[in-house]
Amino acid sequence: MTKIECADVKDLLPEWIRRELEEGDRAVVSQHVSSCASCSGEVELLGRIQAAAFSPPASLASEIKSAVAADMDSSTGVDHRWVRRFGGWRLSVAATVVLALGTAVIWQRTQALPEVGPLGQEPFAVLWPSDDADVAGVPMLDDLSDEDLALLLEELGG
Amino acid sequence: MVEDSSLTSPADEELVQRVRQGDEQAMNVLVDRHHGVVFRTCAAILSDEDLAADASQNSFLKAFRAIERFRGESAFRTWLLAIAGNEARGLLRKVKRRREDRFEDLDILPAGGNDPSVEVTLRSEVARVREVLAGLPEKQRLSVSLRIFEGLSFREIGETIDSTEGSARVNYHHGIQRLRELLGS
């Protein structure tokens, strides 16, 4: 074989020593190596390098798995399986909807008139909710119940 | 407990999809399948087995946390090895800084780290090869390690070390040439 063929063979030697070549290629490389001092020297060198490979500790895989599982249930309290299963954006949408509903309920409550009680115990604004000068002092009678109207008339000396 | 036999041989791409859906068993299969190559890649950079184990664990944690960002433009293994390389380099920088703070010379970490048996081990053939490998420039060291230990193609090695396929091939052959000179083969 020529020197160029040696270069081709040397490219294949890692697969050859790992026994990953197909049978045809393997036979060609084996024949070349057996008759080429340069390539057989390279095989010997690759074998020495391969023997020096670090081996992972036997417990490494299980340690990594434990760390991954712990990471999924991290201290944030968020179950990452749910986040991954339903997608982060879906949770974000759900949180936004809850926030919007909460805001709407609070707004509605602040807009609603409190229940009217006896005049002596309720703030003046109950009967005169508007500060507008045009209507100040004018009770909004339509909103009052019959009992409140009766109390108001009694208060006014009616 | 009965193992899900469908998980014994699915392709990485399918497992990645399952991981995205929170499938813990798929993560375990990927760990089983790739922890060796991840460990050896980290060890090739760090030349220390304890540090390589730490870097390997962090690499998987980071990969699974970032799994949504994996676009599938390269193989999962290549993407994972790129993460592992970054993780190991980061850890090496930290260790070097720590050692430098203690006024210790640390051009390369000795093979075996702080193992008390290191004196004995260093005399062995395996330790000698590791020591010479550790002295190669990083791209040559990774090209040789990934090609010989893992059988990665030059294209995959190029993607892992952020080089072209041709550059990975040149790095590999320069590394082998240097090892031949230093090991006297």
Image (cartoon, grey):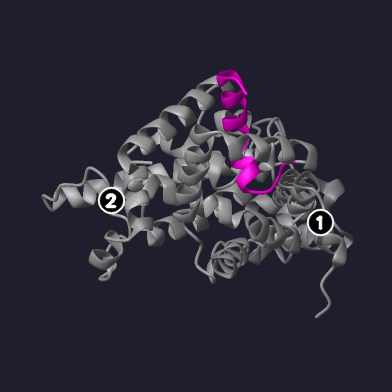
Q: Amino acid at mark 2?
A: Leu
Quadrant where the N terminus of chain B sits is: bottom right
Q: Which chain is home to disc 2?
A: B
B34 displayed left or right of B11: left
Q: Identify residue for label 1.
A: B9
Q: Residue at x 30, y 48 (%)?
A: B94
Q: CA distance from mark 1 to mark 2?
A: 38 Å
**Which residue is depicted at the point 63% across and 48% down?**
A18
> What mark, if any, has residue B123 been given in the picture?
none
The secondary structure that most of the magenta stretch takes on is helix
Secondary structure of residue under mark 2 = loop
**Image x and y of residue B130, in percent:** 37, 50
Q: Nearer the viewer, residue A100 or B128?
A: B128
Q: Relative to residue B182, is residue B159 depicted above or below? A: above
Residue stretch rendered in magenta on the structure:
A1-21
Residue A106 spot, x, y in % from top left? 70, 52
Q: Which comes sooner in the sequence, label 1 or label 2?
A: 1
Q: Which residue is mark 2?
A: B109
